[in-house]
Image: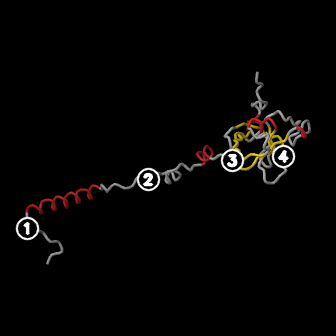
């Protein structure tokens, strides 16, 4: 008995011969079955662009925690940056962000936001992530409560980037 059985039915024989002939021609010409498309960029093989350039654009520093505020007791005193504390300015104290950094602070209770500049170190209480000036806390709506849950987002991390911004609140007429 042969290894390949050939049928005598002409209706089945023709498609079998045509298939064998087609596969022989394709194998001789070097044509292969379609492969899954791949890329030479290893950062794109996961489906997400994880290249350092993309990570720099998409990775942003943030911190979630509790904020408090400070005002009249520290008014006119020297801050860690050497400037005089102004409770009516849009400034804050943070433990680790570089002095001069700009951060967006969002009150997670009412979703109000404000941009402040880090000019001091603190806060002193360990359970807080930031101490805001009175003006910043008032804008966020928590001066009467004293403490609020917040999200901090870094906007600029050096004094050179932060310099063009005027952080004093706009005068309302």
Q: Are marks 3 and 1 in contact (CB under 8 Å)?
A: no
Q: Does residue 102 lie above or below 62 as drawn?
A: above
Q: Which residue is mark 3?
A: 62
> Which is nearer the N-term, disc 4 or disc 3?
3
Q: Nearer the viewer, mark 3 or mark 1?
A: 3
Q: Percent position (x, y) of residue 139?
A: 75, 35
Q: Which residue is mark 4?
A: 121
* Residue drawn at 76 percent across, 41 percent down: 142
- From mark 4 to mark 1, how far is it between C-alphas? 93 Å
* Residue drawn at 80 percent across, 38 percent down: 91
- From mark 4 to mark 3, how far is it between C-alphas? 18 Å
Mark 1 Cα shell of 10 Å, populated few (<14), some (14-19), many (≥20)? few
> Which is nearer the N-term, disc 2 or disc 4?
2
Q: Percent position (x, y) of residue 152?
A: 71, 44
- From mark 2 to mark 4, how far is it between C-alphas? 50 Å
Q: Does residue 81 lie above or below 167 as drawn?
A: below
> Which is nearer the N-term, disc 2 or disc 3?
2
The label number, if any, that marks residue 8 in the structure image: 1
- From mark 2 to mark 1, how far is it between C-alphas? 45 Å
Q: Percent position (x, y) of residue 104?
A: 71, 40
Q: Percent position (x, y) of residue 25?
A: 23, 57
The label number, if any, that marks residue 38 in the structure image: 2
For mark 3, give the secondary structure: strand
> Which is nearer the N-term, disc 4 or disc 1?
1
Quadrant assignment for the C terminus: top right
């Amino acid at each position: 008995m042969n290894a390949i059985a050939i049928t005598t039915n002409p209706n089945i024989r023709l498609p079998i011969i045509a298939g064998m002939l087609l596969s022989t021609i394709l194998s001789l010409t070097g044509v292969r079955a379609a492969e899954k498309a791949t890329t030479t960029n290893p950062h794109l093989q996961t489906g997400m662009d994880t290249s350092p350039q993309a990570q720099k654009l998409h990775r942003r520093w943030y911190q979630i925690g509790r904020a408090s505020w400070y005002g009249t007791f520290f008014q006119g005193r020297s801050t860690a940056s050497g400037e005089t504390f102004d409770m009516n300015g849009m400034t804050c104290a943070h433990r680790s962000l570089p002095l001069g950094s700009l951060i967006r602070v969002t009150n997670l209770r009412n979703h109000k936001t404000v941009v402040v500049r880090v000019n001091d170190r603190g806060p002193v209480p360990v359970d807080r992530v930031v101490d805001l000036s009175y003006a910043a806390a008032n804008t966020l709506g928590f001066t009467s409560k004293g403490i609020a849950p917040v999200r901090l987002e870094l906007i600029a991390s050096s004094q050179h980037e932060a310099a063009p911004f005027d952080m004093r609140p706009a005068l309302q007429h």
